[in-house]
Image: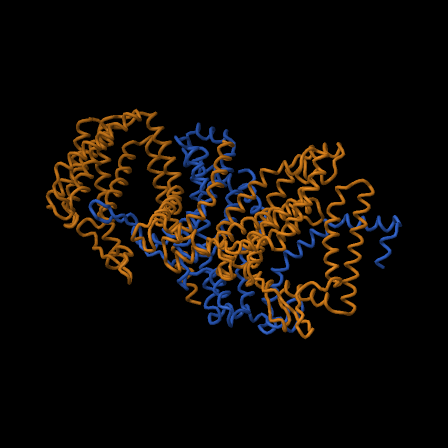
Amino acid sequence: MAGTATTSDGGVVDRVYRVLRAIPTWVLWLIVVIWSLPTLSVFINSFRTRDAQRSRAWWTTTGDELTFDNYQSIFESSATSSLGDSLLNSMAISLPATIIPISIAAFAAYAFAWIDFKGRKGLFIATVSLLAIPLQVALIPLLQLYVGGAHVTLPWIDKTVTLIPDFGLVNTTTAVWLTHTGFAMPFAIFLLHNYISSLPRDVFEAARIDGADHFTIFWRLVLPLSVPVLAAFAIFQFLWTWNDYLIANTMAGTNPDAIPTTILIANLAGDFGMNEHLLPAAAFVQAFVPLVVFFALQRYFVRGILAGSVKG
Amino acid sequence: MGDIAGKIISTLITIVVAVAASGAVWLTANLIVGQARHHWSRFSTLAMGVGGFAFGIVLAGNRALVGTGTIEVETDRNDEVLGWITTGGWFERFIAWVWFPLVAAVAFAVIGAVVGRQTDRRIRIAIGAIGLGAVGAVAGALVREEFRPDIEPVAILLATVIVAGIGAAVSTLRHRDVISGALTGSALGWVIGAWGAPNLGAGSSGWAAVALTVPTAVIGVRIARPGAPDQSALDRLDHKSRAIIFLFPALGFISMNLVIPALRTFYLSLFDRRTENWVGLQNYRTIFSDPKSWDTSEWTNMFSSRLMVIGAALLVVFAILGAVHRRRTGRIVELGSPSSFPLLGAVILIGFAITTTVRGTIVNNIWWVLVVTLFSTTLGLAIAVLADGARFERIAKSIIFMPMAVSLVGASVIWRFMYIARDSAKTQTGVLNSLWVGLGRLSTGEGLPTLIIGLLIIAVFIALVAFTGRALAKGEPARAGAPAVLAILIGWFGWRYWGITGGGVGGFRIRDTGEITAQPINFIQDPPFNNFWLMVVLVWIQTGFAMVILSAAIKAVPAELIEAAKVDGATESQIFWRVVLPQIATTIGVVVTAIVVLVMKVFDIVKVMTNGNFGTEVLANNMFREAFQVGDRGLGAALAMLIFISVVPIMFLNIRRMQREG
């Protein structure tokens, strides 16, 4: 059978030629399959018993191995301490860390786009250039701030002045979303400014002539017109804060009552012990919320990514 | 369940209170400014009230007054100061803290109301000075003993005159009222001279009252002097204060959470582990002299590595193809020219040869940046091109894009299941090892499956050779390149598979007894290539990001350009390399910079999969460990600064781009 292809028969070579021409499509679908394999393996494993996971490969699963026990046990407090609690913590971090930056950044984006003041452009570029700052560079002082407040010791009189008192925020979800709010600012301002500054100028001038002040224009005109970009940023920020591990681990990592799902799963993955068979189920529950958001609102998400990079 | 309900409620309360309180403050600020244009006296009242509250906060917040609570210094086990706490229940502490600001706010507001209404200038100034001075006198009399200053006439006089001069000079330069500037300056100078210079705690309460009365009275004069501004000044005030109000929350968060901490990190990096002793650049020297971050001890091995040999061979191929290409077009290498591919391959392989022999944290970071950026971008571009116009394009793209929604922690867990390596006697449950061991079994075994796969390899090889031959015969050498390379690779694979020179491929090992056993790869623990398997996780995520952006850019290429190229007789690949790629070059730049910035701070994957063990340490994980687990703040800060410095060039690129675009 292998020998036939070498004959000079034009028909066979033509057929081979055509098959090879279709390779790009096959390559695409091969990549798609490879891309979905990891997720699929965890998804299937999450329904398999502990023994099955340890001894047989997931693609040889038989019907009698399937069970919902893993999902049941991760929500029982004994097994993983508290997946339910950590889901709540994730919500307690993600919701304020999404809503608050949107409003604050919308104010600033409006000011940068439509209020004339000296040094506007320089200030805007300075703000947006912070986009690339790695957040590691701020973590140590921020943790110090949450642990003990901010104090300055004046050198020549040797007195300490409290700039920000200690609010006892360390190891709370509040510290985590406050940090997220600050870190989200440059990107949020950049994204919203791109959109708000492209709104038609006539609208604003007409409103000004009618005697509307900046606050009224912002509230009555800009906010309603900017809903698409606000949604895009909201999705972005929600996924980012829900999936964050570094900030939560720094600000609240040592308090079991305040940890979000990512830390719980990382801890579960770290102990390689009795509960490793629960990991797929826990990982899937953790990913469930962002996946729902993602698939339901994919169009806005893509629009946000594009606005944030291509136009830039 | 009651537990959870309680938690939900308390969380909701926190959020609502935080949002409502800050929203109320912001709205109030807008309302106050909104009064300025039409109701000057109302604005004056409200603004003065806010000013009084701020004045009160400065004093009461530092517990400088009698009856504002007492302070205890809180320390940890090592006598390191954690902070200043006040004693008592939260309500008690709140009242102790807030009563004076409230009183001051009301007093200031009353004075503001009178001053705002009064048209006679002299009466206005008298009311301002006496009113604010009285508040200052009361506050000064209340100052706690340990805060009362000593009398130092020379210091007071000097500071007052100097700062007043500065204030006047600044006002002149800004074309503002000189006397106002001098008054503000003299009040400020007095505060510095009276409260800053001498020993606090040595003075009498009478002098403390005087020391606070003088500056408040001067400020009262300063505020009362100008009177209600004219309409154009009011408009300017409206613009300026709106800009401040709209920007303040965002800029406040940015400076508090990013700028000031970043500066402080630099400061901390110059001190030792507890920020006690200045050490200069010692922390940075420690990082660079540590063999863990920069281990060149085995660098000679890179020349004997197989990667280097193949890379060098590819360079030779590049030289030959480049010479041919130069004869035709005058250039050695161009986008998509036959010579560009061996060059790219050689660069990748030699890069791998270097990064697998020179080891260390910093090398790992560089390796991460190169691999993830290169692979995500090229794969994303390839998928964007392949999917463009294909059937079910949206489904394919959704699936590739989906990992973007999964957390890095989740992705690491997911990929751990791909990488599972079990004892060679057991069934492999991870996909990759199962394939690898299965291949080893096939290529060393006998029987029908081995034969079928072997024949299949031969068939594919022959098909590729035929395709190459046909392309050459048709006079299209450009089309012969890819199948020829594939034919060489498959040919080599078949050579090994059939065991022509002692053989087999895949995960197997032949014991001394001649027995063949499985030999899985421990993807996560075998250095140095475990680094690469960790990078794959990030490539899996970032490819979707690159694909979405590049796909949009490709669709935005004007159709006329492509039509024109087709009319001129360009082939598909020529259109891609010569028309599409230059059009989307800026976008590729954006994608690359975004990914580089992301990769420099990669943390989650390394932390979850290896925690930096097995030679996979990267800067961000090292920083986390030093700063928050070992507790060496100086070294942790220095590592954070290194991550920061590595993205500074990209920050500059971004700034330049924004300035160009206006």
Looking at the image, which residue is at 40% across and 60% down?
A: B629
Is B431 located above or below residue A212 in the figure? below
Chain A colour?
A: blue
Q: Nearer the viewer, residue A172 or B514?
A: B514
Q: Quadrant of the image for the N terminus of chain B?
A: bottom left
* Relative to A152, A8 lies left or right: right
Q: Where is residue A223 in the image (x, y as percent from the top left)?
A: 47, 40
Residue at image position (76%, 49%) is A22
The number of discs equals: 0
Toward which corner of the image does residue A42 lie, by quadrant? bottom right
User: Chain B hue?
Assistant: orange
Foreground residue, B211 or B94?
B211
- Point out residue B320 in the picture as x, y percentages from the top left corner: 70, 42
Residue toward you, B80 or A277:
B80
Q: What x and y, as percent, mark residue B181?
A: 24, 29
- Identified at 75% across, 48% down, the residue is B484
Drawn side of residue B552 relative to residue B85, left or right:
right
Q: Is residue A293 visible?
A: no
Residue A7 appearing in the image: yes
Compared across the picture, whether B206 is left or right of A8 comes to left
Closest to the observer: B247 or B571? B571
Up/down of B559 relative to B485, above or below: above
Quadrant of res A63:
bottom right
Colour convention:
by chain
Q: Give x and y (percent) for residue B230.
A: 31, 25
